[in-house]
Image (cartoon, grey):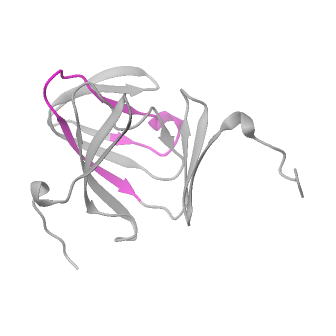
């Protein structure tokens, strides 16, 4: 089925559980609704980030900055981003990213287009964590908690 919507008519979901991270997400194509992609519109408030610095092991991402400006942290350092910029993040350590709204007053709004895999691992280099998502799992672990494959068997 073909889908059409106006961004401002999509239902917004607000998340703010940490002082540095906050967003309003408007799902357009939700996980499970399509077999190969997920599409969301994000609005990041001033001086906030949506997510910590991370990279995906399977899912690729593309952002299109609709309005506002910010800083993108990457493995090569930080770069300024603004309305009209397209950003692609491959599914590996080279695609690590963190987008921060650096404006003191204006929202940073972007489209997030993701590939969709049944199970995904996300690595958080700054905090040394790994997240496992999909197939009924939604967990985050410290990497140093690693055990031997046969531990407890």
Instruction: Residue 131: say if magenta.
Output: no
127 is higher (above) or lower (below) than 9: above
Report the front residue among 13 and 41. Answer: 13
* Residue 89, percent from left and from top: 39, 41
Q: Residue at x 52, y 65 (%)?
A: 118
All told, the count of numbered labels is 0
* Residue 92, percent from left and from top: 52, 41
Q: Does residue 64 appear in the picture of this structure?
A: yes
Q: Does residue 81 appear in the picture of this structure?
A: no
Q: Residue at x 38, y 64 (%)?
A: 31
Q: Residue at x 9, y 60 (%)?
A: 6
* Residue 34, percent from left and from top: 35, 70
Residue 102 quadrant:
top left
Left or right: where 59 falls relative to 43: right
**Image quadrant in which the N terminus is located:** bottom left
Left or right: where 25 falls relative to 61: left
The residue lying furthest to the bottom in this view is: 1
* Residue 62, percent from left and from top: 32, 46
29 is higher (above) or lower (below) than 150: below
Residue 129 quadrant:
top right
Residue 85 quadrant:
top left
Instruction: Residue 106: say if magenta.
Output: yes
**Image quadrant in which the C terminus is located:** bottom right
Q: Residue at x 34, y 60 (%)?
A: 38
Where does the magenta region start and end?
88-115
Left or right: where 55 falls relative to 3: right
């Amino acid at each position: 089925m073909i889908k059409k919507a106006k961004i401002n008519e999509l239902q917004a979901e607000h998340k703010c559980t940490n002082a540095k991270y906050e967003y309003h997400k408007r799902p357009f194509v939700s996980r499970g609704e399509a077999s190969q992609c997920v599409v969301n519109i994000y609005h990041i408030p001033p001086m906030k980030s949506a997510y910590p610095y991370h990279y995906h092991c399977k899912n690729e991402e593309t952002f299109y900055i609709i309005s506002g400006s910010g800083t993108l942290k990457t493995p090569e350092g930080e770069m300024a981003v603004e309305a009209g910029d397209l950003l692609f993040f491959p599914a590996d350590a080279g695609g690590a990213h963190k987008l921060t709204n650096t404006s003191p007053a204006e929202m940073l709004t972007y489209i997030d287009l993701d590939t969709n895999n049944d199970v995904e691992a996300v690595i958080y280099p700054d905090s040394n964590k790994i997240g496992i998502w999909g197939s009924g799992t939604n967990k985050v672990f410290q990497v140093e908690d690693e055990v031997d494959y046969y531990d407890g068997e």
